[in-house]
Amino acid sequence: MTNFLNEREVFLMYCTRKITDDLIWIGSNDRQHPIFEAAHPVPRGMSYNSYLLLDEKTVLFDTVDRAVQTQFMENLEHALNGRALDYIFVHHMEPDHAATLGDLMLRHPEAKIVCNGKAINMIRQFHAADPKGAILVNEGDTLSTGKHNFTFVAAPMVHWPEVVVSYDSTDKILFSADGFGSFGALNGVLFADEVDWERDWLDEARRYYQTACQLDPGNVEYRQTLNFVENSAGGYRPEGYETWSTGCGGSLCGRMACAYLACNMCTCGSMRFFYC
């Protein structure tokens, strides 16, 4: 696609795919970074999935990691085609779902954030923003966008405490945050009948669950965070963490509890972030 602006030629390369008549995949794939979230090798790349619903009201489901921000923003504007963005559903606050949320709020101040109480506090801390008119949803709350009706269900520890999923009862689609994920870039495919799941994806999906989603003391994110808490080196530090304090004491139980809190974003303060 070519746009003309002030007699200068501007090239916008968008890449979207239609899911249903009014639902569009606008995510992007990253094949430039060999490590995901400073912890997980991704030799096949990583997909960052975001969707736009074009109902009577428009809805964006999650954003993406900064690694693919430019592509994502171009995809979004192309898919909106001049329409306003009415809602942003925030299912999860990890960087692969929400790193570009702050920039998106600046680009589309008309959009209302839809999230739960835990996520709104994280938005204030991570993005130094206080979304005006945010809609806070609790277990079982519903929201209609016209033809589509969404129900919100809390899914804490899949795999952070603020996680919520949304279910569209019209098209029977679940927007599942980190649930049912996998490592790997999509290579243009989106549907189950386009791939050999067991051959091409099962191993990476299993590894994703065991190393990124399942939370137990053997999990790589716990080990990295514990190392960070104890040594202030090599730990898992999502974008934006500036300051940390342990206060954990010497027992393994105390250190693991501290790592648990660090992994799960129990933060305080305003512009600074404190572990434990």
Image: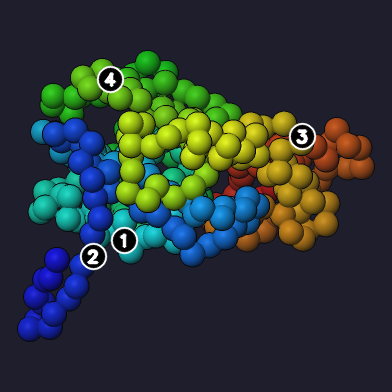
Q: Earlier along the polypeptide chain: callout 1 or callout 4? A: 1
Mark 2 residue type = Met
Q: Secondary structure at mark 4?
A: loop
Where does label 4 land, which residue?
Answer: 172
Mark 4 residue type = Lys
C-beta proximity under 8 Å, tags 2 and 1: yes
x, y (%) of residue 29?
40, 54
Q: Look at the image and tell me in which quarter the C terminus lies.
A: top right
Farthest residue to the right: give it.
250
Residue 240 falls left or right of residue 257: left
Q: CA distance from mark 1 to mark 4?
A: 28 Å
Residue 140 falls left or right of residue 156: left
Q: Mark 3 packing: few (<14 Cα in 10 Å), some, or many (20+)?
A: few
Mark 3 residue type = Pro
Q: Mark 1 packing: few (<14 Cα in 10 Å), some, or many (20+)?
A: many
x, y (%) of residue 180?
48, 30
Where does label 3 land, which residue?
Answer: 217
Q: Earlier along the polypeptide chain: callout 4 or callout 2? A: 2
Where does label 1 land, which residue?
Answer: 71
Relative to 248, is 5 above or below?
below
Q: Mark 4 packing: few (<14 Cα in 10 Å), some, or many (20+)?
A: few
Q: Which mark is residue 9?
A: none
Relative to 192, is 37 above or below?
below
Q: CA distance from mark 4 to mark 2?
A: 31 Å
Q: Looking at the image, which residue is at 53% across and 34% down?
A: 202
